[in-house]
Image (spheres, rainbow, N blue to C red):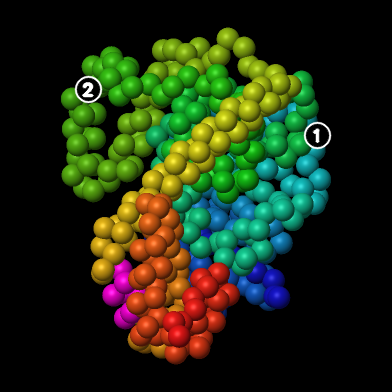
Amino acid sequence: MSEYQYYEFAAVNQQLTEQAQSELRSRSTRATITASCFINEYHWGNLKGEPLDWVERFFDAHVYSSSWGNCRLLLRIPRDVIDAKVILDCVDTPGHSASASMPTAFEVNRTAQHSILDWAFNDDSGEHARFYEQADGPGWMARLLPLRDELLRGDTRSLYLGWLARLVNGELRDSDREPSLPNGLQTLTPAQASLAEFMMLDPDWLAAAAETSPPLLADVDDDARFEPWLLELTAAEMRDALRQLLRGNAQETERGLRTRFLNWDRTRNPGRAEPVTRRTVAEIDARRDAARALRLRRERAANDAAEVRRIAERRRYLDSLIEHESMTWERLDTKLQRGSGHAYGAAFQLLQDLAEAYACVKNDAAFRRGLVRLMAKHGNRGAWVKRLMNGGFMWTPKT
């Protein structure tokens, strides 16, 4: 089996120029290249370029996956959108250095204008079948790209998930402390849940870390926070924001306003987001057994509920066979008349269901009478008779 690598890049804020597309085309004649993306799969060879360089120069996002168990997500955001301390707290925690074979699970590359966030996972254990089916790449970009908009709106839960990935990756010591714990870690967005899946985050580590995370503030609370800042805006600033909206720059306008508000809010309430204490890795680890026990109880309860639903649905189906028994026997007759192996298989499955249905209402005799009538028409079908004998339906023709 050949090697498999999947590369996808996305340009969100600004489309690629003709010159940029030409340069990318010179690196690959087979790739799908448009004004907003570069997509290619490699079964032999490698990308003729450095993903980090391409994101810095051309793109806002990159997803990579390989058949040997590596995956990577890069997101480029404007440098001033998120407080640098919030990012650095997630990537600069002192601890064990990642090895060459096990790179760090989360880091940031800062340029003059951008922060490029870098999540990576290496399945060195070979335990995760997702990587070895050579179909892991497509679809991840659509699932993960919303993380960028969330970050631009000030939602930093994906940064904490990056720190947690470093913990699971063995990069941190028991005495290292967590970064600022974001609200809403127990109720992840679909994109954040996809990131946890992409990075193969242990659900028990995640549950233990999220245990003390406060719920997200309600919209009404946000309105109350916005109001004092809005009162400080001048008429000229409001007109400028409306002008940008009318020009179709909705995303940029929202991001700019939100960034200004968050900067104002941090200045006015510098300690609001800081917890009284930050837990150590050991303290989070101590809650993992409880998180695992709770997860297993929930899974058992969900499985039990699913089994109850399955049994109820099965019984409704069997009852419908008895309720319309004449029609059911006619369906069997029609299938057998086709005379094909597939038809015999479908007929045998339906016959088994019908036998179970009659057994449920304790009327096996009615089933045997119906079977005798059926075999009076189809008893000369050798392949069908053989199925009945092998299946335990001991039919003996009358002499």
Q: Amino acid at mark 1?
A: His
Please, which residue is most extreme toward the front here? Answer: 399
Q: Quadrant of residue 172?
A: top right
Measured in 3D between alpha carbons, the distance from the residue under mark 1 to the one under mark 2, in whole angstroms, is 50 Å
Q: Residue at x 62, y 72 (%)?
A: 42
Residue 122 x/y as whole percent: 71, 51
Q: Quadrant of residue 342?
A: bottom left
Residue under label 2: 234
Residue 147 x/y as whole percent: 46, 43
Q: Magenta residues?
A: 328-334
Residue 183 x/y as whole percent: 47, 24
Residue 362 x/y as whole percent: 40, 53
Q: Can residue 47 be seen by looking at this rendering?
A: no
Left of 29 or right of it: where is 314?
left
Q: Secondary structure at mark 1?
A: loop
Q: Is residue 33 above or below residue 136?
A: below
Residue 96 is labelled as: 1
Q: Residue at x 48, y 49 (%)?
A: 144
Q: Can residue 321 be seen by looking at this rendering?
A: yes
Left of 361 or right of it: where is 116?
right
* Mark 1–mark 2 CB contact (< 8 Å): no
Q: Is residue 268 above or below residue 5?
A: above
Q: Residue at x 62, y 12 (%)?
A: 277
Q: Amino acid at mark 2?
A: Thr
Q: Is residue 160 magenta?
A: no
| Tag in front: 1 or 2 | 1
* Camera-side residue of 227 and 131: 131
Q: Is residue 283 above or below residue 257?
A: above
